[in-house]
C-alpha cells in the first residue's frame, strides 16, 4: 500500500511544480515581457532591461530601445531621418526628397530610394506670381524676376518672397542715352528717341540701347529714265528743302512741300506728254516719296491735330498723340478716315504715334487709264452677275487719290480694318458698271496698277462710298466699265436644236437596243448603257446647267453632270475594248467568247469607276462644284482636270484600241478571198472602228482647239458635232445595221397590217350599221300605216 502511495506522489510532483511555475510567471514578470520559466522573464522585441533581454530579478523592467540613437545598429541611409516608436522605429525621406515608389516610410537603408523633389515643376511650388521658382538639391527658392525687387516689408525668406517692378527710369541712374527718353515697362525699360530725333543707323527705336540723332529730311530722288523739265524743277526745290531743313522748323518744311506737290500736279506741263506707263511711274514716285518724307518729318511735330493746305486742293491732315483716344477720325478734302488708335501704336509702345491722311486731287491726271486687277473672287462674282465672259476692264476715278500713313511702318496686315469715307461727284451706275475700292499696287521698278486686294466696299451711294482696308497705301474709288458680250444666239440655237435631236435619237436607239431581239448581245448592251448615260447627261444639261440660284442644288447638278459624262466616256472605253476583242476573235464571227469576259467587267467598270473619281473629287474639293454662271466644274486650282484627266486617258486608250483593231482588220481583209459574208462583216467592223474613233472622242478635241484666230470656227464645229453625238450613234448602230433595218421593216409591216385590219374592221362596222337602217325605217312605215287603217 505504501508502495502505491509513493508511486502516486512521484507522478503528481511534476504537475504541481508546473502549476507553481505558471502561477509565479503570471504574478511577477513586468509589462512588455514574457515568461521564460519560473525564475526568468524575457523582454518583448524592441524592449530591453538593465540586465539585458532576459532577467531573473523581480525589480527589473523592460524599457523601449531607441533604434535611432547613433550607437544603434539601425541606419536609414542618406537623405533620410529615423523616427523611434514604442517597441519599433521607421524611416522617412528628408524634406525635399521622396521615395521613388511614392511610399512615405521604410525600415532601413536597404529600402532607401530617396530622391530630390523638383518643387518648381511638381505642383508644390508655393512661390508668389511675382517671383520665379529655382529648384535646388532638397529644396527650392523663390527669386524675383529680372527687373523686379522684393517689396519693402514683405517676407524676404527663400520661399515666401514677394516682388515688385523696378522703375529703372526713376532710379537715379542714367539708363538711357541722353538723346532718348526712358520709358519704364514691366520688368524692364525702353529708350525712345526724343521729339525731332530718330535712331542712328544700326540702332532701333524703343530698345534699351537706343541712340538717336536729329531728324533729317530723307533722300527723295526722281524716277530714273523720266525726262521732264517740270519734274526736274520740282526735285530741285525738294533738294532745297532737304538742305535747309531743321527739326524745329518741321511744320514750315511740310507746308512748303505740300505746296510744291500741289503746284506740280496742278500744272504738270510736259508730264502729260509722257507715255502712260511713264506717267504711272512718276505717280508712284510721288506717292511713295511724299509718304516717306511726311512720316519722317512728322516725328518732329508737337502733339495734336495739324492741317496743311494748298491752293489747288492738295491737303494734309495728321494727328500726333502720346497716348491717344480709342478712336481717331481725320478729314482731308472730301475724304474721312476712321481707325482705332491701337492700330497706330507699335506693339507694347506707349509713346508718340502719328497718323496722317494726304489728299492729292491732281494725281488722277497721272493715273488715268491705269489698269485694274481684280481678285479672283470678285472676277467670279462679276462673271456671275453678267452671265458672260469678261473681255476687258476700263475704269474711271470717282474720287481724289489719297495716301494714308502712320508711324507704325508695318501696315501690310493691320489688326483691325481702317474705314475711308469718300465723297465724290454724283454718279449713276449702268447695268455693266461697278464701283470698287482700290489701292495703288506698285512694283519695285516704280510701275503699278489699281488692285482690290485687302479692300472691300462697305457701302456706296450716288455721292459717297465707304471702304474698309486692312493695309495702308494710296487709295481711291473707281467705277469700272465691263465689256460683257452677249452669248452668240446662233450657237445657242444650234446647241438646243442639236441636243434636242440627239435626245430623240438616243431614245430611239435605246428602245431599239432594248426591244430588238435579233441584235441583242454584249455589244448591244454596251450601246444601250452608253445611250442611257448620254441621254441623261444631255437632258440634265439642257434643263439645269444655268440653275445657279440655289448653291446646294447647283453643286448637286454639277456633280451629277460630272458623273454622267464620265460614265459616258467609260462606256465608250468599254466599247473600244469590246471592238478590239471582237476583231481579235474574228475567225468566228460571233460575240460568245467576248461576251463572257465583258459581262463580268462592264457594269462594275462602267458605273463604278466614274463613281470613285467623283467621290474622290467631291471629298477633296467640294466647294469647286459649281461656278457663279454654270453648274459645272470650277476651273480654278486645276479642278477641271478631275474631268479632263480621265477623258484624255480614255481617249488615248480608245485610240490605241481603234488603231490595233484597224491593223487586225487590214490583215484580215488581205487574207479573205471568196467568203462573202465574212468579208462583209469585216468591212462593217472596219467602218464601225473608224466611226467610233470619231464619235468616241475626236469631237471633244475641238474644244481644246478654241484658241487664237480659229477659236470662233472651232466653237461652231465643237457645238455642232458634239450636240449631234446622239444622232451619230443612232445612225451608225441602228440605221446602218442590216439586222436593225430588217427589224424596223417588220415593225412597220406589223404596224401597217394592224392599221389595215383596224380600218377594215371600222368599214365593216359602218356597212352593217348602214344596212340595218332601211329595215328599221320600213318597220316604222308599216307601223304608221297600220295606225291610219285602224
Image (cartoon, helix red, strand yellow):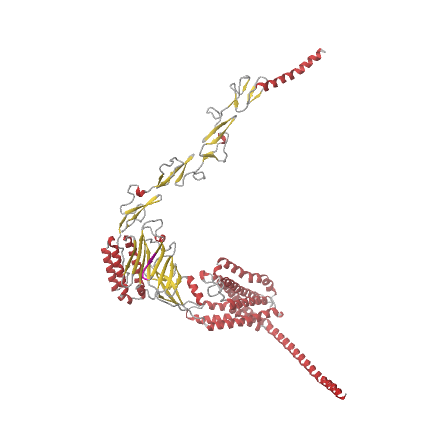
Left or right: 158, with 657 as reference point: left
Please tell me whether residue 202 is drawn above or below residue 16 in the rendered image: below
Q: In the rendered view, does 202 fall on the left or right side of 606?
A: left
Query: Is residue 81 in view?
Result: yes
Residue 97 figure quarter = top left
Question: Which residue is at 31% across, 43% downward?
Answer: 169
Instruction: Say which of 576 and 554 sits in front.
Output: 554
Height in image: 780 above or below 514? below
Q: Choose between 667 and 768: the one closer to the eye.
A: 768
State which quarter of the image contains the C terminus: bottom right
Residue 210 magenta-highlighted: no
User: Residue 511, percent across and down?
Assistant: 59, 70
Q: Which residues are magenta?
A: 329-333
Asked whether, in this view, residue 403 is left or right of residue 73, the answer is: left
Residue 337 in picture, x, y percent from top left: 35, 58
Whole-percent x and y of residue 19?
Answer: 63, 18
Quarter location, residue 686 = bottom right
268 lies left or right of 18: left
Asked whether the viewer can see residue 679, the reply is no
Q: Of residues 734 and 246, which is closer to you in this image? A: 246
Up-down relation of residue 342 to residue 58 (above or below): below
Q: Residue at x 46, y 23 (%)?
A: 71
Q: Residue furthest bottom?
A: 789
Which residue reaches farthest right?
790
Q: Position of residue 680 (x, y in %)?
A: 58, 72
| Quarter of the figure that contains the N terminus | top right
- The residue most toward the front is 790
Amino acid at each position: 500500500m505504501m508502495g502505491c502511495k509513493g508511486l502516486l506522489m512521484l507522478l503528481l510532483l511534476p504537475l504541481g511544480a508546473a502549476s507553481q511555475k505558471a502561477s509565479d510567471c503570471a504574478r511577477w514578470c513586468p509589462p512588455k515581457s514574457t515568461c521564460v520559466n519560473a525564475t526568468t522573464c524575457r523582454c518583448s522585441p524592441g524592449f530591453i532591461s538593465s540586465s539585458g533581454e532576459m532577467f531573473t530579478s523581480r525589480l527589473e523592467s523592460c524599457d523601449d530601445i531607441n533604434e535611432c540613437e547613433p550607437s544603434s545598429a539601425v541606419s536609414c541611409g542618406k537623405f533620410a531621418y529615423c523616427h523611434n516608436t514604442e517597441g519599433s522605429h521607421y524611416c522617412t525621406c528628408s524634406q525635399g526628397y521622396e521615395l521613388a515608389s511614392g511610399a512615405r516610410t521604410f525600415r532601413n537603408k536597404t529600402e532607401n530610394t530617396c530622391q530630390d523633389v523638383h518643387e518648381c515643376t511638381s505642383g508644390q511650388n508655393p512661390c508668389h506670381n511675382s517671383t520665379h521658382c529655382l529648384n535646388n538639391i532638397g529644396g527650392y527658392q523663390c527669386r524675383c524676376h529680372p527687373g523686379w525687387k522684393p517689396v519693402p516689408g514683405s517676407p524676404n525668406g527663400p520661399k515666401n518672397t514677394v516682388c515688385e517692378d523696378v522703375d529703372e527710369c526713376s532710379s537715379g541712374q542714367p539708363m538711357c542715352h541722353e538723346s532718348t527718353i526712358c520709358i519704364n515697362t514691366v520688368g524692364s525699360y525702353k529708350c525712345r528717341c526724343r521729339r525731332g530725333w530718330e535712331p542712328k543707323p544700326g540702332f532701333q527705336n524703343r530698345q534699351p540701347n537706343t541712340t538717336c540723332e536729329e531728324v533729317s529730311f530723307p533722300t527723295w530722288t526722281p524716277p530714273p529714265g523720266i525726262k521732264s523739265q517740270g519734274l526736274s524743277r520740282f526735285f530741285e526745290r525738294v533738294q532745297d528743302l532737304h538742305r535747309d531743313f531743321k527739326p524745329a522748323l518741321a511744320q514750315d518744311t511740310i507746308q512748303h512741300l505740300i505746296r510744291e506737290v500741289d503746284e506740280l500736279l496742278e500744272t504738270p506741263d510736259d508730264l502729260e506728254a509722257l507715255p502712260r506707263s511713264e506717267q504711272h511711274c512718276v505717280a508712284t514716285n510721288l506717292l511713295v516719296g511724299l509718304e516717306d518724307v511726311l512720316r519722317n518729318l512728322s516725328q518732329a511735330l508737337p502733339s495734336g491735330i495739324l492741317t496743311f493746305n494748298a491752293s489747288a486742293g492738295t491737303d494734309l491732315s495728321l494727328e500726333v498723340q502720346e497716348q491717344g483716344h480709342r478712336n481717331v477720325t481725320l478729314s482731308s478734302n472730301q475724304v474721312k478716315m476712321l481707325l482705332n488708335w491701337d492700330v497706330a501704336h507699335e506693339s507694347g509702345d506707349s509713346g508718340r504715334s502719328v497718323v496722317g491722311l494726304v489728299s492729292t486731287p491732281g494725281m488722277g491726271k497721272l493715273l488715268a487709264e491705269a489698269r485694274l486687277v481684280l481678285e479672283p473672287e470678285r472676277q467670279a462674282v462679276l462673271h456671275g452677275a453678267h452671265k458672260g465672259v469678261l473681255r476687258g476692264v476700263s475704269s474711271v476715278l470717282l474720287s481724289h487719290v489719297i495716301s494714308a500713313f502712320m508711324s507704325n511702318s508695318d501696315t501690310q496686315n493691320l489688326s483691325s480694318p481702317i474705314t475711308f469715307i469718300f465723297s465724290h461727284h454724283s454718279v449713276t451706275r449702268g447695268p455693266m458698271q461697278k464701283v470698287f475700292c482700290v489701292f495703288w499696287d506698285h512694283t519695285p521698278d516704280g510701275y503699278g496698277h489699281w488692285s482690290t486686294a485687302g479692300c472691300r466696299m462697305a457701302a456706296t451711294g450716288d455721292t459717297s462710298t465707304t471702304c474698309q482696308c486692312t493695309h495702308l497705301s494710296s487709295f481711291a474709288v473707281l467705277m469700272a466699265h465691263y465689256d460683257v458680250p452677249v452669248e452668240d444666239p446662233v450657237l445657242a440655237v444650234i446647241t438646243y436644236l442639236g441636243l434636242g435631236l440627239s435626245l430623240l435619237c438616243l431614245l430611239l436607239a435605246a428602245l431599239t437596243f432594248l426591244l430588238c431581239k435579233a441584235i441583242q448581245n454584249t455589244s448591244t448592251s454596251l450601246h444601250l448603257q452608253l445611250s442611257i448615260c448620254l441621254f441623261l447627261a444631255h437632258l440634265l444639261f439642257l434643263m439645269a446647267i444655268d440653275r445657279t440660284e440655289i448653291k446646294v442644288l447647283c453643286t448637286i447638278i454639277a456633280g451629277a453632270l460630272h458623273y454622267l459624262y464620265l460614265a459616258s466616256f467609260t462606256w465608250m472605253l468599254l466599247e473600244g475594248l469590246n471592238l478590239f476583242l471582237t476583231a481579235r476573235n474574228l475567225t468566228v464571227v460571233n460575240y460568245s467568247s467576248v461576251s463572257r469576259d465583258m459581262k463580268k467587267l462592264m457594269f462594275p467598270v462602267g458605273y463604278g469607276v466614274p463613281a470613285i473619281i467623283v467621290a474622290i473629287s467631291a471629298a477633296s474639293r467640294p466647294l469647286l462644284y459649281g461656278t457663279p454662271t454654270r453648274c459645272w466644274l470650277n476651273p480654278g486650282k486645276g479642278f477641271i482636270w478631275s474631268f479632263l484627266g480621265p477623258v484624255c486617258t480614255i481617249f488615248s486608250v480608245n485610240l490605241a484600241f481603234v488603231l490595233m483593231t484597224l491593223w487586225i482588220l487590214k490583215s484580215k481583209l488581205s487574207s479573205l478571198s471568196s467568203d462573202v459574208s465574212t468579208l462583209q462583216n469585216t468591212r462593217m467592223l472596219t467602218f464601225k472602228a473608224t466611226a467610233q474613233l470619231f464619235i468616241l472622242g475626236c469631237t471633244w478635241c475641238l474644244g481644246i482647239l478654241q484658241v487664237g484666230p480659229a477659236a470662233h470656227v472651232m466653237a461652231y464645229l465643237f457645238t455642232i458635232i458634239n450636240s449631234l453625238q446622239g444622232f451619230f450613234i443612232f445612225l451608225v448602230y441602228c440605221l446602218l445595221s442590216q439586222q436593225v433595218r430588217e427589224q424596223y421593216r417588220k415593225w412597220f409591216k406589223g404596224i401597217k397590217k394592224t392599221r389595215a385590219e383596224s380600218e377594215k374592221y371600222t368599214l365593216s362596222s359602218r356597212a352593217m350599221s348602214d344596212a340595218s337602217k332601211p329595215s328599221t325605217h320600213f318597220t316604222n312605215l308599216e307601223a304608221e300605216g297600220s295606225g291610219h287603217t285602224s
